[in-house]
């Protein structure tokens, strides 16, 4: 998924060559599939469960992060909807900017979310082993 995100950042970045609309859409569809799988795996296999079992005071933060999955996925679906509208026609500079802005808004929110998930796991581990006591 990291590679797909990097490719999207490059294609939709300020210094990109003008990609074909279908190329952007194909990449976003692939990323959508990976994103759905990423969230499903985190939820199905209890990504936080072991850490939270050891640090139950973090359970509300973990639940809040888990609930963000649906919101982030819906935001990304909005990005793909913009791209889909452009798929079979020539996109204006403004339409490409709208797509790029929507993607970068999602990307920033997703990176922040992933960072907070990682910080929660680190906090749970630190609490478990007593770091900072």
Image (tube, grey):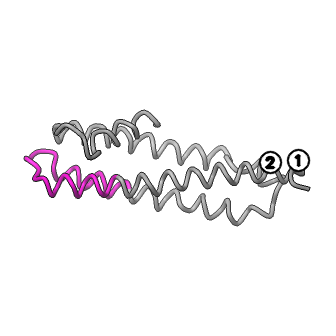
Q: Indicate left or right for 107 with 123 as reference.
A: left
Q: Position of residue 103 (x, y in %)?
A: 33, 52
Helix, strand or loop for disc 2: helix
Where does label 1 land, which residue?
Answer: 129
Residue found at x 21% / y 55% = 97
Q: Nearer the viewer, residue 45 or 73?
A: 73
Reading the image, the residue beneath label 2 is 125
How many numbered marks have been drawn onto this rendered protein structure?
2
x and y, in percent, of residue 100 in the image? 27, 52
Query: At 19% from the left edge and 37% from the top edge, which residue is drawn?
Result: 17
Identify the element where label 1 is drawn: helix
Q: CA distance from mark 2 to mark 1?
A: 6 Å
Left or right of 117 in this view: 18: left
> For the view shown, which residue lies furthest in the front direction?
15
* Other-residue count near label 1 (Cα within 10 Å), few / some / many at <14 / 14–19 / ≥20: few
Q: Which x, y percent locates residue 5?
A: 40, 40
Between 98 and 32, the residue placed more toward the observer is: 98
Image location of residue 133, percent across then percent down: 92, 56
Residue at 7% across / 47% down in the picture?
90
Up-down relation of residue 45 to residue 124 (above or below): above
Residue span colored magenta? 76-103
Q: Main secondary structure of the magenta part?
A: helix
Q: Is residue 80 magenta?
A: yes
As drawn, the residue found furthest toward the top would be 3
Q: Is residue 112 above or below residue 30?
A: below
Tell me which residue sits at (39%, 36%) in the image: 4
Farthest left residue in view: 90
Mark 2 and mark 1 in contact? Answer it, CB < 8 Å. Answer: yes
């Amino acid at each position: 998924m990291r590679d797909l995100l990097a490719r999207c950042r490059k294609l939709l970045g300020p210094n990109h060559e003008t990609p074909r609309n279908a190329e952007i859409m194909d990449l976003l569809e692939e990323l959508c599939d990976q994103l759905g799988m990423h969230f499903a795996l985190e939820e199905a296999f209890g990504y936080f469960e072991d850490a939270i079992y050891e640090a139950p005071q973090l359970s509300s933060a973990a639940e809040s992060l888990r609930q963000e999955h649906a919101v982030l996925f819906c935001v990304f679906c909005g990005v793909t909807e913009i791209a889909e509208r452009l798929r079979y026609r020539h996109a204006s500079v403004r339409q490409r900017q709208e797509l790029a802005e929507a993607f970068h808004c999602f990307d920033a929110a997703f990176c922040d979310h992933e960072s907070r998930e990682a910080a929660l796991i680190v906090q749970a581990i630190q609490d478990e082993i007593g770091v900072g006591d």
